[in-house]
Amino acid sequence: ATTGKHLNPEEKERRLSQMSLLLLDELEVDAITVTTPLIFAVLIASMLMFNMGYNISVMNAPEPFVFPGHSTSAWSMAVAAFCVGGPLGAVLAGQLADQRGRRGALMITTWLFILGGLVQALAPSLNIVIVGRAIIGVASGASTVLVPIYLGELAPPNLRGVLGTMTQFALVIGILVADLVGFVLANPTGWRYMFFLTSAMAFFQLLLTPFLLESPRWLLGRNANSNKARFIIKKLRGFRYDEEVETEVEHYLGASKSQSCNDSNDNSGGSSAKNPMLEMFQDKKVRLLVISTLVLQVANQFSGINAVFYYSGLFFDGVIENPLVGTTLMGAINVLATYVALLLMDKCGRRTLIMWSSAGMFVSCIVIVVSLNGYFSDMVALGAVASYVCFFEIGLGPIPWLIVAEMFEGKYVTAAMSISCQLNWACNFFVGLFFPYINKSLGAYSFGPFAIVLLLTF
């Protein structure tokens, strides 16, 4: 009966027509994978990264007006407090995401942004600003973990790369907006409003949370028969038939079962599961990957990129008439370079991009140092900084984060991402705290240490 020999020609033709229609429906669903619920979920989640980017650069413009008379060490601590909260947020985010769900963890992070922004805006002293910065750091650290996980679990396979870059786009646009806002609010009466905008943006995001869907992968992990997960999958994918939904559910469950089987086989020789962190360093092949990842994370921060974004006003002072113009120009170039990186990412190898990125940044650093010593004009120095930012975005910026998911097995990804985040935030704190002293001690040669790191990376 299954061969169709018993069917007459008319019945065969009718069934073939039905099959053709079903095939066309499936092709149409594949073509229209970008649904409105998916767009809303991606944009709302990406607002967290926007807020993080905004707070990376927000301390630049108002520095002379925030409690005037503060010392260099006090302001450095206010900037670096952002990086103190970051590792804590990165650690807590994983636990929150598993216990409260991806959506719940994202909402808690949004509330932290609201709290941190209000503490800064209403601060009676610089010490309270430091507390607010630390709270925002916790929210930002959590965002770096939660948003990529959330988008990766919601996005269809053919859109994961594109939607993954949304996090970086949102981040650099946030940096640019902070620079633009500085033109209006970086003054003795407006700096509190600059800090308050963090809370305002987070509150706006909170109003949109009814459109923020829970991760179906998380729901199915807790209950394979979850009707809510199936309803969300149908909305996200634009499916019309229950069969399509069940096929997608099987993909989710199949991946989870496969991982569980692999973990069971790996642990069958012992009485209890190994710590993934220890296991990574015990396996020689994986250990090499871990070392490579950590080296790239160090290079990501010690290349000096955040010295530009944290202290661009300090750097451009004396180079151009209005340092804020230079800061904003770098923010705009950063957005454009991120778009170029998107075009190159899947066309060139990761290693090739890292080599070009580190080499280009190294040459840019040398030109910056030579220009600041008076051998070239200030405009050449400005162009070298622009080149430096562009080369960062095509390689050393995104790739250290991308390769964690690409190089490691599923059971190691969380541990590898965790240790990468901790090291990155630690190096970020070091740059944020000590660059003003480096700049004061080395003057025109302040980019020299960064050039050495980039040469070693190459």
Image (cartoon, helix red, strand yellow):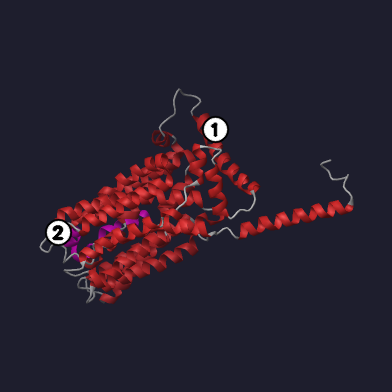
Closer to the camera, 94 or 270? 94
Name the quadrant containing residue 184.
Answer: bottom left
Q: Number of labelled discs?
A: 2
Residue 87 vs 198, above or below: the answer is: above
Q: Amino acid at mark 1?
A: Cys
User: Disc 2 marks which residue?
Assistant: 72
Which residue appears farthest toward the top when viewing the image? Answer: 271
**Direction from residue 218 to residue 386 in the image, left or right:** left
Of callouts 2 and 1, which one flags the residue occurring earlier in the amino acid sequence? 2
Q: Main secondary structure of the magenta part?
A: helix
Q: Give coordinates of residue 430: x percent, y percent.
A: 24, 51
Residue 6 seen in render: yes
Residue at image location 47% in from the left, 62% down from the top: 342
| Res. 261 mark | 1
Residue at image location 33% in from the left, 49% down from the top: 141
Rate crowding at label 1 as few (under 14), some (14 to 19) or many (20 or more) other CA atoms within 10 Å: few
Q: Is residue 83 magenta?
A: no
Q: Give coordinates of residue 252: x percent, y percent.
A: 56, 43
Q: Secondary structure at mark 2?
A: helix
Q: Secondary structure at mark 1?
A: helix
Rate crowding at label 2 as few (under 14), some (14 to 19) or many (20 or more) other CA atoms within 10 Å: few
Depth-wise, is mark 2 or mark 1 nearer the camera?
1
